[in-house]
Image: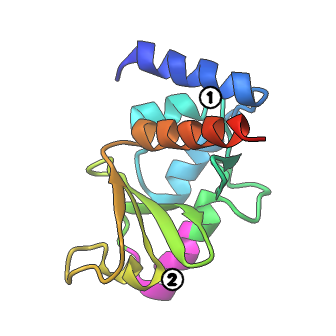
Amino acid sequence: MNQERLAQLHQRYVALYSEEPTRGGGIAELQALLDVSLPDEMQAIAEFYSGGIVGGISHNSFDPEPAAASIAKTTLSFRSAINLPYRFIVLAELDESVIVLDVESEVVTWCDNCDVSRLDGSSEMLGKTETWPSYADFFEFCLDEEEEERRYQ
């Protein structure tokens, strides 16, 4: 994990928003509820960002309580509804797409709703898919989008 890069992401985020850390114990609770281990850099970002809108995307909350749109609640819902494999957690659910993190490979995938059941690789994705090699890369993309959006306001 690159501490310098995480420090830069932290500075960029705080320049756009106020620091909003995840509640103490929230990450441990999230990991226990979902029976996963979150990547270290994701946990580091959760120390200053708890979820919410960044880059035009409403991200689920890291804290399982009391948020209706939390990573835990949304992921458990997808696991129940479509048997989402346990290695995936739902970062954001948009109108026609979903953003997930594979906690094993650390890859973030943005795919169409119709492709969520194909995330396990059992069949080819039908729609457009974007991927980032890590949560930090995805978070940086969101910050880039937010900064770009603010330039034109």
Quarter where residue 110 is shown: bottom left
Q: Is residue 53 left or right of residue 99?
A: right
Q: Which residue is mark 2?
A: 80
Label 1's element?
A: loop
Q: Using the rendered image of the protein, determine whether residue 9 is visible from the camera's viewpoint.
A: yes
Q: Is residue 82 magenta?
A: yes
Q: Nearer the viewer, residue 88 or 65?
A: 88
Q: Which mark is residue 47?
A: 1
| Image spot of residue 126 (x, y percent) | 30, 83
Nearer to us: label 1 or label 2: 1
Q: Which residues are magenta?
A: 75-84
| Image spot of residue 55 (x, y percent) | 63, 47
Quadrant containing the N terminus in the rendered view: top left
Instruction: In the rendered view, tell whether residue 72 sits above or below residue 95.
Output: above
Instruction: In the rendered view, tell whether residue 127 sits above or below residue 8.
Output: below
Tell me the crowding category of disc 2: few under 14, some 14 to 19, or many 20 or more residues within 10 angstroms, Cα based. Answer: few
Q: Using the rendered image of the protein, determine whether residue 87 is visible from the camera's viewpoint.
A: no
Instruction: In the rendered view, tell whether residue 40 sits above or below residue 88.
Output: above
